[in-house]
Image (spheres, rainbow, N blue to C red):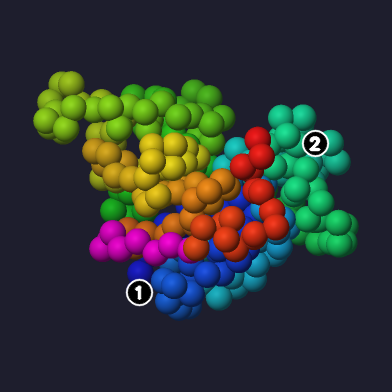
C-alpha cells in the first residue's frame, strides 16, 4: 500500500487519468490531492465527477485550493468572481453546461467537505499553498493563507542549505512538520518540470494549468509519476496559457 500526493489538476481530466495509470494506482493506495482541481482546461466539472467516483474505491484526501474556493462560491451563489472568471473560471462554468442542478449540488457538497490541510501519522503536512504562523497551521490567524500564501515556498527555496534544523536561524514554521507538501506555485516558474524539494518542503505543482505536466509523488520512496504535458493532451485548447 502506497500514499501518493497529487498536484494541481486544473480541469485536466485526461492528465489525471493518465498519471493514475502511469503510477499503477490500485484500490489499496491512498491518494492525497493538494487542491486546484478546476479552472484551465475544459473538463473541470468532469474532474470533480471522476474524483467523486474515485473516492468510492480509494482512500482519498482532498485539500482545498484557491480555485476550488472560487468554484464553490459560484456553485453556491451563481455569481462568479471577476478575477476567477478571468483565470480559468469561464472554462469551468462552460464545463458544467450539461450537468444537472442535482449534480451541481453534489459537487458543491464535495467542495464544502474538503479539508484546508491534512497532517498524517508521520507528522507530514499537506496543504495547498502555505501558512504564516510560526506556531504551525493550528495557530494560523488568516485561514485564507492556506490556499493563497506563497511565502512558505519562497522562504524554503531561498534558505541557506547549511542552516541546520537545530539552529536558531532555522525558520520556526518549518520545524513543526517532518515534511510539507504543497501546490499553488508552479515549478515551471523556476524552469523545473518535476516536483521541487527545498529544505523539508515538496512543491508538486508542475504547471499542469499551463505548459507543464500533472505530477504524483510516492511520499515514502519519492518516486515521481507524470502525465504528458497538458497542451499535448488538449491540443485544441490553451488552458491558462492565454492569460
- Magenta residue span: 220-227
The residue that appears at 53% across and 25% down in the rendered structure is 142
Residue 8 location, x and y as percent? 53, 50
Asked which secondary structure carries label 2, the reply is loop
Q: Disc 2 or disc 1, which is closer to the eye?
A: 2
* Rendering coords of residue 59 (x, y %): 49, 67
**Tag 1's secondary structure?**
loop
Q: Which residue is mark 2?
A: 80
What's the CA distance linking mark 2 and mark 1? 40 Å
Mark 2 and mark 1 residues within 8 Å of each other at the beta carbon = no
* Residue 143 visible in the current orientation: no
Left or right: residue 160 versus residue 53 is left
Rendered image quadrant of residue 225: bottom left
Give the residue at x 61% y 50%. 10
Position of 125 relative to 107 (above/below): above
Which image quarter: residue 90?
A: top right
Q: Residue at x 26, y 63 (%)?
A: 221
Q: Quadrant of the C terminus?
A: top right
Q: Position of residue 104 (x, y in %)?
A: 80, 56
* Closer-to-camera residue (119/232): 232
Q: Which mark is residue 1?
A: 1
Residue 167: x %, y % from top left: 12, 26
- Residue at 73 percent across and 42 percent down: it is 89
Amino acid at each position: 500500500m502506497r500514499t501518493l500526493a497529487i498536484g494541481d489538476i486544473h480541469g485536466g481530466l485526461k492528465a489525471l487519468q493518465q498519471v493514475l495509470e502511469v503510477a499503477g494506482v490500485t484500490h489499496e493506495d491512498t491518494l492525497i490531492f493538494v487542491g486546484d482541481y478546476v479552472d484551465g482546461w475544459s473538463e473541470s466539472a468532469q474532474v470533480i465527477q471522476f474524483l467523486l467516483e474515485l473516492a468510492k474505491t480509494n482512500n482519498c484526501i482532498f485539500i482545498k485550493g484557491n480555485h476550488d474556493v472560487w468554484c464553490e462560491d459560484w456553485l453556491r451563489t451563481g455569481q462568479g468572481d471577476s478575477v476567477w472568471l478571468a483565470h480559468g473560471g469561464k472554462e469551468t462554468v462552460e464545463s458544467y453546461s450539461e450537468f444537472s442542478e442535482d449534480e451541481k449540488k453534489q459537487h458543491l457538497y464535495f467542495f464544502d467537505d474538503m479539508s484546508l490541510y491534512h497532517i498524517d501519522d508521520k507528522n507530514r503536512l499537506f496543504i495547498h499553498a502555505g501558512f504564516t504562523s510560526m506556531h504551525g497551521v493550528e495557530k494560523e490567524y488568516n485561514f485564507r493563507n492556506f490556499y493563497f500564501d506563497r511565502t512558505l515556498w519562497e522562504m524554503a527555496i531561498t534558505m541557506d542549505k547549511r542552516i541546520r534544523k537545530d539552529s536558531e536561524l532555522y525558520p520556526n514554521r518549518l520545524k513543526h512538520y517532518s515534511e510539507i507538501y504543497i501546490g499553488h506555485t508552479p515549478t515551471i516558474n523556476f524552469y523545473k518540470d518535476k516536483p521541487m524539494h527545498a529544505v523539508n518542503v515538496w512543491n508538486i505543482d508542475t504547471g499542469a494549468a499551463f505548459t507543464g505536466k500533472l505530477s504524483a509523488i510516492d511520499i515514502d520512496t519519492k518516486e515521481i509519476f507524470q502525465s504528458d504535458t497538458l497542451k499535448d493532451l488538449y491540443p485544441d485548447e490553451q488552458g491558462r496559457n492565454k492569460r
